[in-house]
Image (spheres, grey):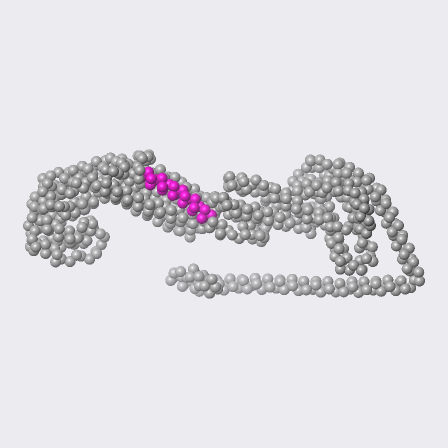
Amino acid sequence: MDEIEVTTVKLSELLRHTEDLDKIGSLKAEFARKKAVLDAQIKSGLKQQLQVTEAGLGAISDGQRKINTIKEEMMKIEKLCVEAQNMIQEFPLINKISKIHRNFVAVEDMKSGLQGLDTKLSTVDRMLQDDDGEDIMNPMPNLIPVHHQITQIQDFRDNALHQSSTLDQDIRHTLESYFSPLLNTVDTFDERIGIISMNMIELVRAGNVGLVVRLAKIIDAEERSDEKVLALQAAQNSHQELASRFKSIQTGPKVARGYKQKWLDCIKSAAAARFNGIAEAFIEDPDTLSDSLQWFFDDLRTVQQYFPQLMPPKWNIFETYLNIYHGLMHDFLKSLVEKPDLDGGCLLKVILWNTEYTKNMKALGIKATDLTPRLLDGKEDELVKEYLHLIVNSMEKWMDKIIADDTKDFINRPQTLEYDENKNAGMPGAIVMFQMINQQIEVALDSNKGSVVAGVVDECVRMLKNRQNVWQKVMKEEVEAYCQNPDDAAEGILEYSIAVANDQLKCAGYAESTSAKTAPLLSRKFAEQVTQSLDSAIEGYVATAEACIDRCVDIIFQDLKPAFALLFTPSWYGGEQMSNIIATIRSYLLDPCEQMLNADLFIGLVENLSEVTLQTYLSAIRNKGAKLHIAEACEQIRNDVVVGYQFFTEFLPPEQVKASWSVLEYFMGLISEPKDSLYTKYEQFKEAYWDLSPAWVEAVVKAREDSSRDLVNVVKKQEPYVVSGKPTIMGKVK
């Protein structure tokens, strides 16, 4: 995305609505103020950088002048040396005698050193033995003297081996074997230095700061010695001829022993050892991560508080520890997130730990963003996406299993329904499903990231809607199969349909509770997103519950087909078909519907039964053999209305039933109205029910005993009304 596109996106975010145009003036003022602040910061930073650059250039110039001055002085010394040799006639002889004397003294020193080597090593070993002990308060007073003695012996050995470099190989082997006992002593000393180095924090906490100071003095001395060795080696490589003339350059330590780096390695090894076992415990219980890593910040606080006054300032000891510890923490977390079997809960704990790490670093006065490398390599957003992916995968597996088990039970109907305290039937998967969802949302809430919570909720709602679609599809297929061949179908389809309907209403309540509990914990932006997402799930549950009620009606009316098939046929006149229909509906409502169905859904079921009864009754005019004897038909319809009205008013308000069943008055008008006034009656019917089907009206007129072409033409010549309001019951009668 180029700069223009970025600017366009920003502007679209700021000016989303028409009323936002009124804010342009204030936005310009705010951006001008921000620009002025940024310009001032840039100007100040540029000025500081310029000063630093000028100071650096000045220092380089001063250094160059000093180097030139030293060169000039060295050239003067060289000139004076040559002139002095020419001024003394016997200078070559004097120089030769001086070399002989120096060699003689060196031989005497070498002899004395070799003769006293065993004594010195014995003394050092005894001091090491005196300091031996595992007590953390052991001050080890001989540590510095031991180091001093060992350093002298090592320098002596290095000098001796250096001088023997031109001698016979056998002599060198003899000399090396003479110094071999020194290796054991040095190993013992180095091991002790390593143990102390790895336990410095514990020593300081215990109050044994003297031992830490002694260690620091030794490491400091070794560091300066190594710097000298490296500097001399560089000088010898650069100015071999000049170096050969100065004895001070040829004496002293010959090898850099690297104690400073070994000391740093011990600090790192000690800290790295503390991470052992944490990863395994974390995988078993992710909640242990914070407690398991508390030592990390305790160590840094101890170093920050006590170590600066115990160590040379040039070491910047706290920064040294901080860099080592931070690097180890980075590697540790990286190893965790790269585990192939890491689940979503563990990954979220790692993401949360990043926030806790930043907070603890801030307490130490450190900005976590200033540390390198970034704790999670700057991949926090990627890890959040990966977390959502893991959660979605896990939940989809759970959901798929729950849906598979529930739909299998619905199809096979093994009579394993569950019942609540109101004796309402239900499937076992609904409660488990929302327990899992709420658990994942609670875990996401712990992240304190609204985007994570909203993402989890959106994915959960997506899976819930999928479950709703599955139920609607399975129920439709099963009920259709039952209606086509009820004798071969497994028993209990109505009971299971009731259970599924109850579950939909129960899940809608769970979703509403989840929304009310989650939204207040989020910012306005994410609260609205979560609320809208869960509201859509609730609407889906209501729609699915209504679909379930429709399927229940289909099942009940499967038993009513024979009775409805007799309406308006000769056997209908004076018969008890309507009473039989109502008796069948009553038996279904009383058992199992009223006993097993949620009270609200039960009322909805009764309303649907009332409406479908009317629809089927009116549609029965197309029954084979239907014939309307005007007087007898109207009388029979009135009797049927009384039966139906009395029954449905047992469950529904009378005015509601009357409003629905009054359509039969218009129906009787079509049956009994003479030809001359049929047009008016038909028009009144259409005014009350705008979606009245002309084809159905034509069928009614044709079924009249006085039907004729002229009578039918009254209906045919009328145009249907245009859409004018909500669909009516007659829109479903074809």
Where residue 426 sits: x, y (%)? Answer: 32, 38
Q: Quadrant of residue 574?
A: top left
Q: Residue at x 70, y 62 (%)?
A: 59
Q: Residue at x 16, y 45 (%)?
A: 617
Q: Is residue 514 visible?
A: yes
Q: Residue at x 23, y 44 (%)?
A: 608
User: Per the image, is 393 magenta?
Assistant: yes
Q: Is 29 drawn above or below residue 317 in the view shown?
A: below
**Residue furthest toward the right?**
89
Q: Is 246 drawn above or below residue 273 in the view shown?
A: below
Where residue 610 sits: x, y (%)? Answer: 20, 43
| 63 left or right, relative to 513 | right
Q: Is 372 drawn above or below residue 192 in the view shown?
A: below
User: Per the image, is 83 magenta?
Assistant: no
| 362 left or right, relative to 661 | right
Q: Nearer the viewer, residue 512 or 588?
A: 588
Q: Quadrant of residue 579?
A: top left
Where does the magenta region start and end?
387-410
Where residue 511 sits: x, y (%)? Answer: 37, 44
Please name the predominant secondary structure of the magenta segment in the image.
Answer: helix
Q: Residue at x 78, y 37 (%)?
A: 126
| 84 left or right, relative to 169 | right
